[in-house]
Image (tube, rainbow, N blue to C red):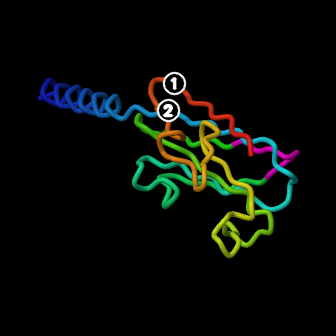
Amino acid sequence: MKTIANLILILTLGIANVNAQDKVTQDVVVTITNFDNDKGKVFIALYNSEASFLGTGYMSVISNIKDKACSVTFKDVPHGIYAISLFHDENGNNKMDSNFLGIPKEDYACSNNAKGFMGPPKWQDAKFEVKNETIHQAIKI
């Protein structure tokens, strides 16, 4: 009976170990510099698909700005293709302000420092791969 109990315990631990190895994750560290000031907050979103890019983020965080910079870490991000977008909510109204043409009035940026031409940055320019090591994205506003 004791042998059967030990066998069940070993099998259970073995299955748990295999499941733990299947869920490989990494951290994504985002450092943002060159803000005009320390007013307001910065809204940062991590996207896991082109379809959701600049819409609803896979993960998101709001950060304070200190000395015209900030740094955040998205923890335990599964391997895959991602992109980041952010905006500086300088007036603290929890949204990106734009003019009557829809052009942003507040600073914004994307991963890889991707820039848009006559529109927002493209997924293809902002995407990066999370695989095997911590990712560091240095973004300049």
Q: Look at 50% across and 56% down and name the residue there.
A: 57
> Label 2 neighbourhood size at 10 Å, few (<14), some (14-19), many (20+)?
some
* Extreme residue toward the bottom, this view: 100
> Label 1 neighbourhood size at 10 Å, few (<14), some (14-19), many (20+)?
few
Q: Secondary structure at mark 1?
A: loop
* Residue 37 percent across, percent down from the top left: 87, 53
Residue closest to the eye, 85 or 63: 85
Q: For residue 107, what is the image quadrant? A: bottom right
Kind of residue at badge 2: Gln
* Residue 63 percent across, percent down from the top left: 71, 53
Instruction: Judge from the rendering whether residue 52 lies leftward or rightward of residue 29; answer left or right.
Output: left
Quadrant in which the N terminus is drawn: top left
Q: Which residue is mark 1?
A: 133
Magenta includes 67? yes
Whether tag 2 and tag 1 are in contact, CB under 8 A, the answer is yes
Q: Look at 52% across and 52% down and name the residue there.
A: 59
Q: Secondary structure at mark 2?
A: strand
Magenta-colored span: 65-71
Q: From the viewer's perspective, is residue 89 above or below residue 10?
A: below
**The label number, if any, that marks residue 121 in the structure image:** none
Q: Which residue is mark 2?
A: 26
* Residue 30 percent across, percent down from the top left: 65, 39
